[in-house]
Amino acid sequence: MVSARAPSLSRAAEARTDDVRFDNYSLILKGQRVFLYSGEFHTFRLPVPSLWPDIIQKIKAAGLNGVSVYIHMGLVNPAPGVVDFDSFRALQPLYDAAKAAGIWVVLRPGPYINAETTAGGIAHWATTEVAGTLRTNDSDWKAAWQPYIQGIIEATEANQISNGGPVIAVQIDNEYSQNPISHAEYFVDLEDAYHNSDIVVPLTYNDPGMGRNFINGTGAVDLYGLDSYPQGFDCSNPTRWRGVVTNYHQYHADVNPSQPFYSPEFQGGSFDAWGPTAPGYGPCRELTGPNFQSVFNLQLWASNFKLLNYYMLYGGTSWGGIPFPGVYTSYDYGASITEARELGTKFDELKRQGIFLRSTKDFYKTDWVADASTGLSVSSNPNAFITLLRNPDTGAQFFIARQNDSTSTATTTFQLNVTTSAGSLRIPTVVDAITLGGRESKVIVTDYTFGESSQALYSTASVFFAGTIDGRDVLFLHGNVSQEHEASIRLTGRPSRLTQPSSPKVMQSHGRDFTTFSILAGLEGLATLYDSDTQLVLYADSETAAAFWAPVIPGAVDDPFRNYWGFGTNQTVLVGGPHLVRTATLESRGRVLSLTGDLKEGVRLTVIGPKSIRQITWNGDSVTADGVAPPPSATEGAITAQLELHNDFTGIRVPKLTGWKFRDSLPEVNDADFSDDRWTLANKTTTNIPKKPLYGDGRILYGCDYGFCENIVLWRGHFEATGQEKSLNLSINGGRAFAASVWLNDVFLDTSFGNSTNNRNSIEETDEKFAIPAGALQRGDNVVTVVQDNMGLDEDNTEKSPRGIRGFSLEGGTFGDWKVQGKVGGYRDFPDKTRGVLNEGGLFGERQGWHLPGFDTSDWVERDLARGLPDQKAGVGFFTTTFDLNIPENIDAMFSFNFEESLGQPYRVYMFVNGWMMGKRVANLGPQAKFPVHEGILNYRGSNTVAVALWAMLPNVTNQPDLQLTLDAVYEGGVGNVQVDNPEWSSRGRE
Ligand code: IPT
């Protein structure tokens, strides 16, 4: 435990709790130095609260100790004065899951969050009704956010660390500038709101770049941080690297040296944009893959960052109207945990790094000594760029090595001249060199303490785990299998059965105080280097190391921090083999080790834990230890067993989506008796939206101004025909990648296609002339029907986006009434409080609730979705079908809905699964064709409804949607008990 000296403590120390302090090195929680190692997770992008523990447990299993969470004002506060933390908007299940896993929470409630979401998270009612400038100290904006922030405060107070909860910081807004003063005063207003409450944890901020905002002066926060996305967001060139940022440390030294170095967002993946050239998330995961994590993350460590958050760690799904116009439904982000909640090689690398940090307290307090650019010349090869960090108390040193050209794919070998407690050395001493195999970075340690008191003089192999297990000091090293590595260790204790390293690829040379283990290239699997009554030293190739877990054994039941590593517990075991180990407990005075986790297949289980263990259970079932071929020969304290699956995955039936029922959803065009009497008259002539109409007669045809801000909005423009009408002109704006189809009476005129590029300067609105074909006009009342998609409001902070018809004119005539209809009830009175304000739009079928489970379709016609709309007309129709699932409990199965036809056809699909709009397929743009949907939205033991609104934007679509349900992966385990909350249809009256 390190207690910081009072003078060096900065602002948060004056703060209202001693439980969260910091000095110039790191965060200090409850008096303990902490490296905050966290990942970003947006609960609103996984609208199944019972699955939040799944993500949190996976974050924990990677060795991380924190989660950073944006909260979405627009979802929580859908209408003026309405603050709703029910269903997926809740905070408490997140806090409970974090506490149960021992994970700290940094809460980022905005109100502005950016986050590739509509209006950057600002509630649509606010972008509409606030006349002043958003995100300034304008009084109506201030009044607008108060109820939301007060709601956040009330839901959070009791969950702060000072009250035994997980919350350690609250971020003020998001990425902003301190100038002009109205911005800074806005921060002051938000800070006042927290200061006038029982929120006692520090207030933080994320600067978009090296902008020096909010460090000092008006609105300055307690703890400043800097966001960084050095690789950018171009996933289409996944191997093209931009190189690491080399001046982080200098920036820290210049701007806030009295605070620890904090990155509230460091690139953990990338978002992807609409359009046929968008590559999809596979390449994003490659662009930010394990080698990126190795080189770029270690560059952060080398820059002495001690609070880090990877954005995103789990991206999830931008379902319903969540996206801003630049992104599609999937927000997978190429993150370490996939949208379907799966783990892959990025997770492996994250875990190798995370467990190292968790194991290495000496790393939490380091002085940045020098690097190769400031005169550190320790490397024999200038192509290896070294940064040296040193712990001033223990003398532990961390040489962080990367390629001098950080994008280099060359193999670089070097020796390092280091000064240690045992004098100067050139390491390695026995094998030839340290190797950087292309895009790879390493931490090389000297005078490294592991466990209670053991010492490694140096290691050129990476540390995976260090700690104490059953009173023994344990060190677990790893390295690239094609390289040689070396570690020099002061051996203690009485050697056990194993007197030689268990692999012939390990050479041992005894010095006076230290024994040097040289690991030759090609050592695969796990090797025991040394095994005594006081020490255990293991080595594995990096891939094998990633198959190990170090679950934390919870401490005393009455300790609120019993699950927090280093706080309520310092006890851990090593478990190798399973796909995932979620939790471990030791019961019956250490005799029973209970493990929970996931299996993909049968595996060999290796447990290195206390000798007291007599029994191991896996997901509740007793495991029979077999002692067969224990990990490298007879390592003391290791237990091995075979874990087999209990379930036969091949028995899982994947229903085919058949039996579709169909009904037309455009009576506005197809039913001569349709009346829009009950629609809203669009007769406003003023709007708070700064971008005013381009032409027309002064009437404002922006959906938001009538409460219809989300998803599809329909417009009806009436006129009395004189016969002179030749054409109409419409300028329509739905944001990038939108579309709007236009009819005159029952005659289809055309569709306007929005621009799909992600270029902010591109024109978003269309401006088109629609010729009136002969015979389309009718005597008396004529009506123009516009079906318009709204892709979300722009993110640009103070922006209030015009969404709707920005210009209208009728050549040869004059428009009479314009009517507008979006989703039922608009943003004030929408009926589906569970799925929330962003779920549905204004299509007739949606207004009727056809997308909801339980709607009676017995009088609908049978029609296969793959046949498209009748007569190949442009229009909108609803297709629904149901299917049963029967997945055994304790199976985590990943399903997705897939459009198997090729891209390029002019239609859009709004896919509702049990009422939730889980996918928007824009078939002419793409790229997304695969839509993962989780248990909780899907009912795994019962009936499910899928409803598809198909909008054919042009006649004669040739390649119709071919929608199939796919089982992508199956695991035995999971968090279990996933609650299903899919309210059924009830009558909504007629709109
Ligand atoms: C940063 C935002 O803070 C975050 O909300 C998200 O939008 C992220 O970008 C990109 O996914 S802003 C940063 C790119 C300057």
Image (cartoon, rainbow, N blue to C red):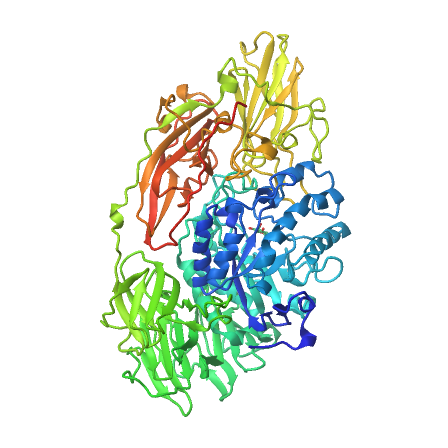
- Indicate the position of residue 423 as horizontal and vertical percent values: 50, 89
Q: Tell me if residue 178 can be seen.
A: no
- 715 relative to 353 in the view: left or right: right
- Indicate the position of residue 867 as horizontal and vertical percent values: 36, 25
Q: State which quadrant residue 964 falls in.
A: top left
787, above or below 646, in the image: above
Foreground of the two, 402 or 122? 122
Q: Residue at x 41, y 62 (%)?
A: 348
Foreground of the two, 396 or 487? 396
Residue furthest front in the image: 558
* Quadrant assignment for the N terminus: bottom right
779, above or below 191, in the image: above
77, above or below 608, in the image: above
302, above or below 432, in the image: above
Residue furthest right in the image: 181
* Quadrant assignment for the C terminus: top right
- Indicate the position of residue 375 as horizontal and vertical percent values: 60, 77
Q: Which residue is drawn at 73% across and 29% down?
A: 686
- 121 relative to 664 in the view: left or right: right
- Indicate the position of residue 783 as horizontal and vertical percent values: 58, 16
- The count of marks equals 0
Q: Tell me if residue 872 can be seen.
A: yes
Q: Which residue is drawn at 54% across and 15% down?
A: 745
- 183 relative to 711 in the view: left or right: right
